[in-house]
Amino acid sequence: MTKILLVDDHAVVRMGLTMLLNAQVDFEVIGEASEGNEAIQKASELHPDVILMDLSMPHGKDGLTATIELKKQHPQIAILILTMHDDEEYLFRAIQAGASGCILKSAPHDELLQAIRSVATGNAYLYPTATKRLMEEYLERLKHGGNKDSYMQLSDREKEVLTFIAKGYSNKEIGEQLIISVKTVETHKGNLMEKLGLKTRPELVKYAVKKGLLDYDV
Protein backbone atom coordinates (compact mmCIF):
# COMPACT_ATOMS: atom_id res chain seq x y z
CA MET A 1 0.00 0.00 0.00
CA THR A 2 1.42 3.38 -1.05
CA LYS A 3 0.84 6.05 1.60
CA ILE A 4 0.21 9.49 0.09
CA LEU A 5 0.28 13.01 1.50
CA LEU A 6 -1.68 15.59 -0.51
CA VAL A 7 -0.47 19.20 -0.56
CA ASP A 8 -2.68 21.79 -2.27
CA ASP A 9 -4.10 25.13 -1.15
CA HIS A 10 -7.58 24.32 -2.51
CA ALA A 11 -9.71 22.14 -0.25
CA VAL A 12 -11.96 21.11 -3.15
CA VAL A 13 -8.95 19.86 -5.11
CA ARG A 14 -7.71 17.86 -2.12
CA MET A 15 -11.17 16.37 -1.64
CA GLY A 16 -11.37 15.26 -5.27
CA LEU A 17 -7.88 13.77 -5.23
CA THR A 18 -8.59 11.95 -1.97
CA MET A 19 -11.69 10.32 -3.44
CA LEU A 20 -9.81 9.32 -6.59
CA LEU A 21 -6.76 7.92 -4.82
CA ASN A 22 -8.57 6.12 -2.02
CA ALA A 23 -10.66 4.33 -4.63
CA GLN A 24 -7.45 2.56 -5.75
CA VAL A 25 -6.61 -0.71 -4.01
CA ASP A 26 -2.91 0.20 -3.73
CA PHE A 27 -3.22 3.82 -2.53
CA GLU A 28 -4.09 5.37 0.82
CA VAL A 29 -4.25 9.12 1.45
CA ILE A 30 -2.91 9.46 4.99
CA GLY A 31 -2.94 13.23 5.29
CA GLU A 32 -3.45 16.64 3.70
CA ALA A 33 -1.73 20.01 3.88
CA SER A 34 -2.64 23.41 2.45
CA GLU A 35 0.89 24.87 2.18
CA GLY A 36 4.55 23.94 2.42
CA ASN A 37 5.22 24.42 6.12
CA GLU A 38 2.27 22.23 7.02
CA ALA A 39 3.47 19.64 4.49
CA ILE A 40 6.90 19.47 6.14
CA GLN A 41 5.29 18.99 9.56
CA LYS A 42 2.84 16.33 8.31
CA ALA A 43 5.61 14.45 6.50
CA SER A 44 7.56 14.14 9.75
CA GLU A 45 4.47 12.94 11.61
CA LEU A 46 2.95 10.59 9.01
CA HIS A 47 5.94 9.24 7.02
CA PRO A 48 4.29 9.07 3.58
CA ASP A 49 5.79 7.16 0.67
CA VAL A 50 4.73 9.80 -1.87
CA ILE A 51 3.87 13.49 -1.56
CA LEU A 52 1.67 14.95 -4.27
CA MET A 53 2.80 18.58 -4.14
CA ASP A 54 1.08 21.58 -5.70
CA LEU A 55 3.69 23.95 -7.10
CA SER A 56 1.87 27.26 -6.65
CA MET A 57 0.51 27.99 -3.17
CA PRO A 58 0.27 31.75 -2.50
CA HIS A 59 -0.27 31.44 1.27
CA GLY A 60 2.63 30.00 3.27
CA LYS A 61 5.60 28.13 1.81
CA ASP A 62 5.37 27.33 -1.92
CA GLY A 63 5.72 23.83 -3.31
CA LEU A 64 9.20 24.28 -4.73
CA THR A 65 10.73 25.55 -1.49
CA ALA A 66 8.91 22.86 0.50
CA THR A 67 10.24 20.18 -1.85
CA ILE A 68 13.82 21.32 -1.28
CA GLU A 69 13.43 21.17 2.50
CA LEU A 70 11.58 17.86 2.43
CA LYS A 71 14.27 16.17 0.32
CA LYS A 72 16.90 17.34 2.80
CA GLN A 73 14.96 15.97 5.77
CA HIS A 74 13.34 12.93 4.16
CA PRO A 75 15.29 11.93 1.03
CA GLN A 76 13.42 8.61 0.86
CA ILE A 77 10.07 10.29 0.19
CA ALA A 78 9.15 10.59 -3.50
CA ILE A 79 7.67 13.97 -4.42
CA LEU A 80 5.48 14.37 -7.48
CA ILE A 81 4.90 17.99 -8.47
CA LEU A 82 1.38 18.86 -9.56
CA THR A 83 1.37 22.02 -11.69
CA MET A 84 -0.75 23.97 -14.14
CA HIS A 85 2.37 25.39 -15.81
CA ASP A 86 3.49 23.58 -18.97
CA ASP A 87 6.73 25.54 -18.90
CA GLU A 88 10.38 24.50 -19.12
CA GLU A 89 11.53 26.84 -16.36
CA TYR A 90 9.14 25.30 -13.80
CA LEU A 91 10.10 21.82 -14.94
CA PHE A 92 13.84 22.37 -14.52
CA ARG A 93 13.37 24.06 -11.15
CA ALA A 94 11.29 21.14 -9.87
CA ILE A 95 13.88 18.60 -10.99
CA GLN A 96 16.70 20.65 -9.49
CA ALA A 97 14.77 20.83 -6.20
CA GLY A 98 14.72 17.04 -6.00
CA ALA A 99 11.24 16.14 -7.22
CA SER A 100 10.81 12.65 -8.68
CA GLY A 101 8.55 13.97 -11.37
CA CYS A 102 6.01 16.51 -12.63
CA ILE A 103 2.48 16.15 -13.91
CA LEU A 104 0.03 18.74 -15.20
CA LYS A 105 -3.19 19.42 -13.28
CA SER A 106 -5.01 19.03 -16.58
CA ALA A 107 -3.75 15.44 -17.01
CA PRO A 108 -6.30 12.58 -17.21
CA HIS A 109 -6.85 10.58 -14.02
CA ASP A 110 -5.20 7.50 -15.49
CA GLU A 111 -2.03 9.46 -16.19
CA LEU A 112 -1.95 10.81 -12.63
CA LEU A 113 -2.31 7.31 -11.18
CA GLN A 114 0.45 6.05 -13.47
CA ALA A 115 2.73 8.91 -12.38
CA ILE A 116 2.19 8.20 -8.68
CA ARG A 117 2.86 4.50 -9.15
CA SER A 118 6.00 5.31 -11.12
CA VAL A 119 7.58 7.58 -8.49
CA ALA A 120 6.45 5.26 -5.67
CA THR A 121 8.63 2.50 -7.14
CA GLY A 122 11.67 4.75 -7.34
CA ASN A 123 11.31 5.80 -10.97
CA ALA A 124 11.01 9.30 -12.41
CA TYR A 125 7.98 10.63 -14.24
CA LEU A 126 7.62 13.53 -16.66
CA TYR A 127 4.44 14.35 -18.52
CA PRO A 128 4.71 13.45 -22.23
CA THR A 129 5.13 16.96 -23.65
CA ALA A 130 7.92 17.66 -21.14
CA THR A 131 9.76 14.48 -22.13
CA LYS A 132 9.47 15.43 -25.80
CA ARG A 133 10.75 18.94 -25.09
CA LEU A 134 13.75 17.68 -23.14
CA MET A 135 14.65 15.26 -25.93
CA GLU A 136 14.38 18.01 -28.56
CA GLU A 137 16.59 20.31 -26.51
CA TYR A 138 19.17 17.58 -25.97
CA LEU A 139 19.33 16.82 -29.70
CA GLU A 140 19.57 20.53 -30.49
CA ARG A 141 22.55 20.89 -28.15
CA LEU A 142 24.28 17.94 -29.79
CA LYS A 143 23.65 19.44 -33.21
CA HIS A 144 25.39 22.65 -32.19
CA GLY A 145 28.26 21.02 -30.36
CA GLY A 146 26.48 21.33 -27.02
CA ASN A 147 28.93 19.03 -25.29
CA LYS A 148 31.43 21.90 -25.20
CA ASP A 149 31.05 23.73 -21.90
CA SER A 150 30.56 27.41 -22.74
CA TYR A 151 30.29 28.16 -19.02
CA MET A 152 34.07 27.85 -18.69
CA GLN A 153 34.42 30.78 -21.11
CA LEU A 154 32.71 33.15 -18.65
CA SER A 155 34.72 35.43 -16.41
CA ASP A 156 34.20 35.21 -12.64
CA ARG A 157 32.20 38.45 -12.72
CA GLU A 158 29.99 37.17 -15.55
CA LYS A 159 29.31 34.01 -13.54
CA GLU A 160 28.27 36.15 -10.57
CA VAL A 161 25.94 38.23 -12.75
CA LEU A 162 24.43 35.07 -14.25
CA THR A 163 23.68 33.65 -10.80
CA PHE A 164 22.01 36.86 -9.64
CA ILE A 165 19.92 37.05 -12.83
CA ALA A 166 18.77 33.47 -12.29
CA LYS A 167 17.73 34.33 -8.73
CA GLY A 168 15.47 37.08 -10.06
CA TYR A 169 17.55 40.16 -9.25
CA SER A 170 17.07 43.24 -11.42
CA ASN A 171 20.06 44.93 -13.06
CA LYS A 172 19.90 47.66 -10.41
CA GLU A 173 19.84 45.11 -7.57
CA ILE A 174 22.76 43.20 -9.10
CA GLY A 175 24.74 46.43 -9.32
CA GLU A 176 24.05 47.11 -5.63
CA GLN A 177 25.11 43.59 -4.66
CA LEU A 178 28.35 43.69 -6.67
CA ILE A 179 29.00 47.41 -6.12
CA ILE A 180 29.12 48.17 -9.86
CA SER A 181 27.04 50.43 -12.10
CA VAL A 182 23.88 49.31 -13.89
CA LYS A 183 25.64 49.97 -17.19
CA THR A 184 28.46 47.59 -16.18
CA VAL A 185 25.90 44.95 -15.20
CA GLU A 186 24.28 45.30 -18.62
CA THR A 187 27.67 44.93 -20.30
CA HIS A 188 28.45 41.74 -18.36
CA LYS A 189 24.97 40.42 -19.13
CA GLY A 190 25.42 41.08 -22.85
CA ASN A 191 28.81 39.42 -22.88
CA LEU A 192 27.71 36.28 -21.07
CA MET A 193 24.59 35.93 -23.23
CA GLU A 194 26.76 36.13 -26.33
CA LYS A 195 29.19 33.53 -24.99
CA LEU A 196 26.37 31.16 -24.01
CA GLY A 197 24.36 31.75 -27.18
CA LEU A 198 21.27 32.84 -25.21
CA LYS A 199 18.91 35.72 -25.92
CA THR A 200 16.46 36.16 -23.04
CA ARG A 201 16.35 36.19 -19.24
CA PRO A 202 14.21 33.01 -19.07
CA GLU A 203 16.86 31.22 -21.13
CA LEU A 204 19.52 32.39 -18.68
CA VAL A 205 17.44 31.15 -15.74
CA LYS A 206 16.95 27.75 -17.35
CA TYR A 207 20.66 27.49 -18.13
CA ALA A 208 21.62 28.40 -14.54
CA VAL A 209 19.22 25.81 -13.11
CA LYS A 210 20.64 23.07 -15.33
CA LYS A 211 24.17 24.07 -14.33
CA GLY A 212 23.24 23.84 -10.64
CA LEU A 213 24.21 27.47 -10.02
CA LEU A 214 21.29 28.38 -7.78
CA ASP A 215 21.61 28.15 -4.01
CA TYR A 216 18.23 26.93 -2.80
CA ASP A 217 18.97 27.24 0.91
CA VAL A 218 16.26 29.25 2.62
Image (cartoon, rainbow, N blue to C red):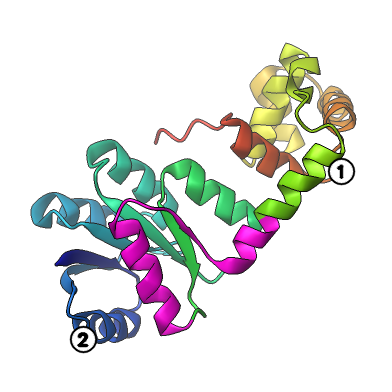
Stretch in magenta = 108-133
Secondary element under disc 2, as helix, strand or loop, is loop
Residue at the spot 75% in from the left edge and 28% down from the top edge: 147
Residue 140 horizontal/vertical position (percent): 81, 46
Q: How far apart are marks 2 and 1 (CA)?
A: 48 Å
Q: Which of marks 2 and 1 is in front?
A: 2
**What secondary structure characterizes most of the magenta part?**
helix
Residue 94 horizontal/vertical position (percent): 49, 50
What amino acid type is highlighted by mark number 1?
Answer: Lys
Name the image quarter holding the C terminus: top left
| Residue 86 seen from this side | no
Q: Residue 142 magenta-drawn?
A: no
Task: Residue under label 2, please give it.
Answer: 23
Residue 209 higher or lower than 12, as above or below: above
Task: Residue under label 1, please give it.
Answer: 199
* Other-residue count near label 2 (Cα within 10 Å), few / some / many at <14 / 14–19 / ≥20: few
Residue at the spot 83% in from the left edge and 27% down from the top edge: 192
Q: Residue 112 magenta-drawn?
A: yes
Name the image quarter holding the N terminus: bottom left
Quadrant of residue 163 in the image?
top right
Give the camera-side residue of 187 and 6: 6
